[in-house]
Image (cartoon, grey):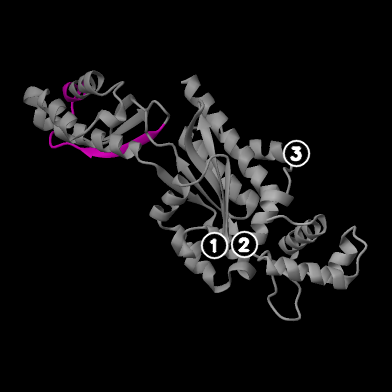
Amino acid sequence: MELSPRKQKILAAVVEQYIKTGEPVGSKFLQSALDISVSSATIRNEMAELAGMGLLDQPHTSAGRVPTTEGYRYYVDHLMGDRKLDDSLKRRIEAGVSIKNASPEGVISKAGEFLAELTNCATVSTIMSGKDARVKRVEFVPIGSRTGMIVLLTSNGIIKSRVCRSDTDLNSSLLEKFYNIVKSAFIGLPLDEIDAATVQTVVASAGSDALAMIPFVTTLSDLIIESERTSVMLEGQSNILHHDSDYGHTAHELLDFLRRDEPLSRILAESRDGVDVRIGSENKFKQLEKSSVIMAKYNVDGDKRGSIGIIGPTRIDYAELIPSVRYLSDLVGKIITRILNEE
């Protein structure tokens, strides 16, 4: 779809003013705001043609115009331009994401919290999956006479832990046996090579201690399987309630939707490379038809490892939020890369 320069100016002005005020934009405002010497009647005709193209809508007969999903899309793709973040916002993002002695999961969680605060939207992110990762370290922390905590660290920085209960009293001999099994059978092994057959073989190799080892090895195996899955983190979902004029009575329906992991996992998994912007009805789920989703993948050591982004009303400041999400996701990837390379 090609628009004349005048139509482009009018569409951009309608989108930006509507984002700012939430009120339909009329021809009189455009005549005073735009650097074009034409009558308000001419502007109304141009707006009517933009409406005929599906780019603008008129909520009421006497009202001004508002952008449609297609109008926002044309604005984002052709009119918005590539706004550069100023240094003060970059420093704010860097301060908001940085955290001392953090794990990769901690960095992603902190980034999600900060992005929700920065954008006043809900934020969704994926913790790196264990794909291509290996078992790096395993610790057993005694809690009681028959209870302990098994802690797993993978080569890509995932940390998982779970309480394990033994059928026998814990002693130094039993724990030494467990560590020997871990060292010989698990350390350095790719996560995706560990399955039920591996567990059976490992337990059988324990000989007379096989029964005692079952809870330990089974718990460790469960942690490894859990590490392979992509975990979804949601922050700032209550921000949706701040946009009552955009969502109205559908806000609580959207909140219920955001509490479900499966659709969020699909949104993240299906996001395209770079910054992926899906507006209103472009989203596959009905609950998101009044929302825009802006997602960006973060890279760790050059490999795409996860995504982070925002969910908010279609009436958001795309020109500012898209570069902010891009900068933050790039920063998350760099920080996690540094953490893993320092270990």
Point out residue 37 in the picture as x, y percentages from the top left corner. Answer: 93, 62
From the viewer's side, name the closer residue of 107 and 289.
289
Q: Is residue 303 left or right of residue 164?
A: right
Amino acid type, callout 3: Ser
Q: Which residues are magenta?
A: 158-176
Residue 336 place in picture, x, y as percent: 51, 30
> Going from the N terminus, do you reach mark 1 or mark 2 first?
2
Residue 267 visible in the current orientation: yes
Residue drawn at the location 13% of the way across and 37% of the way down: 167
Distance between the alpha carbons at the discs numbered 3 and 2? 32 Å
C-alpha gap between disc 1 and disc 2: 7 Å
Mark nearer the viewer, 3 or 2: 2
Q: Note whether 247 is above or below 132 in the view shown.
A: below
If the image is split into quadrants, where does the N terminus sit? bottom right
Q: Residue 316: x percent and y percent?
A: 66, 57
What residue is disc 3 on?
A: 88
User: What amino acid is at disc 2?
Assistant: Thr
Determine crowd level at label 1: few under 14, some 14-19, many 20+ residues with C-alpha closer than 10 A.
Answer: some
Mark 2 highlights which residue?
Answer: 69
